[in-house]
Image (cartoon, helix red, strand yellow):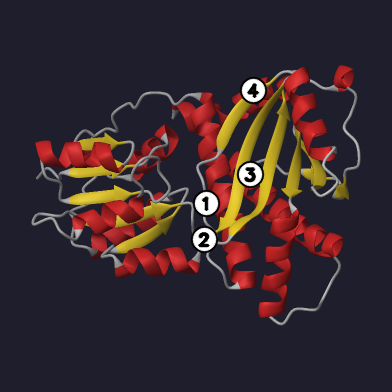
Amino acid sequence: MSHRIVICDDSALARKQLCRCLPPPWQDDVRFAGNGHELKALLAQQPADLLFLDLNMPQMDGYQVLQWLQGQPHAPRVIVVSADIQADAYRRVMALGALQFLKKPVVAEPLLNLLGQLGYNLTQETETPPLPAVAFDDALQEICNVAMGRAAANMAELWGQFIELPIPRLRRLGPAELAMLLEGGLSDPELTVISQGFAGHGICGEALLLMQPEGDALLAQLTRANNQAESSPLERQMDTANLVFAVFLSALSQQLDIPFCQSHPVAMSSAPAMSKLPRTLAVEIRYQLPKRGILCELLLLLPESTLPRLHTVMTPLMEH
């Protein structure tokens, strides 16, 4: 018996990882959508029995899809698969009709157990069909997406606030562009920039946390609201940086299966000379509170020299 299955996720790596976890006989029948609008077009062509749905997507996100499905007469069963693992995200999707919530990256055994509980036949005699390789940038974006979600979940638990998450943005920067970015931030006396380096198995990089006065004001409000001890702005910012860096880099390390050594976080006061700056791949992530403003921004800097090694480490994720 064939199953009409759709995986809706903007990440090619996430779609591939999830499809690989399904029983092999199912994999030939899976259709893919990159956002809610593409999903609507697919369902108009042919309904689905089961939908695996991401939350953070461009144009039409998972929450909007769930709301739309409530008005559809032949809506599929929905399992949400997301890097945003905040408790509020879970409550919201379950209230909107999702059957279950799985965190990224998907692991085959819990997924198959869930499908068995839902009454699906999980025969796996068929050989697994090949899937196309995933581009390096897409794979790295998804790995950072998972790390971003775990850091947000920790912040949300600490402060009792839902953290709004973006899609991580990747940019390649030359020395002049990187210098302009760093100097622009460090020349602003009101902007705090905290840095932490990391390295392991030939891969190295630097994580920066950027915080404007508005973000610190939000931090102060959250601290008071949760009856936490009063602290200076720099102490609050350092505490936030320690939290974000620790969880983000730990999630990065786990997914790459590489232990990272990390330097102590420091508040930066000046940018390195442009002659010392390498070409760099930058990953930008903005954490914000809905309707209240930007809390902080995370900037992950990966020098060009480390990318070949990173590509090698990520090859099993991209090709298998």
**Residue 123 as seen in the image, left or right of residue 284:** left
| Circle 3 SS class | helix
Instruction: Check disc 2 and report the residue beneath it.
Output: 291
**Label 2 vs label 3, nearer the camera:** 2
Q: Which of marks 3 and 1 is nearer the N terminus?
A: 1
Work out how far the residue at label 3 is from the one at label 1, CA to CA, in angstroms: 17 Å
Q: What residue type is labelled 4?
A: Arg
**Residue 273 as seen in the image, left or right of residue 148:** right
Q: Which of marks 2 and 4 is nearer the N terminus?
A: 4
**Residue 191 as seen in the image, left or right of residue 8:** right
Work out how far the residue at label 2 is from the one at label 4, CA to CA, in angstroms: 31 Å
Residue 188, image x, y percentages: 82, 42
**Label 2 vs label 4, nearer the camera:** 2
In the picture, the disc for residue 165 is: 1
| Circle 2 SS class | loop
Q: Earlier in the sequence, mark 2 or mark 1?
A: 1
Instruction: Check disc 3 and report the residue beneath it.
Output: 252
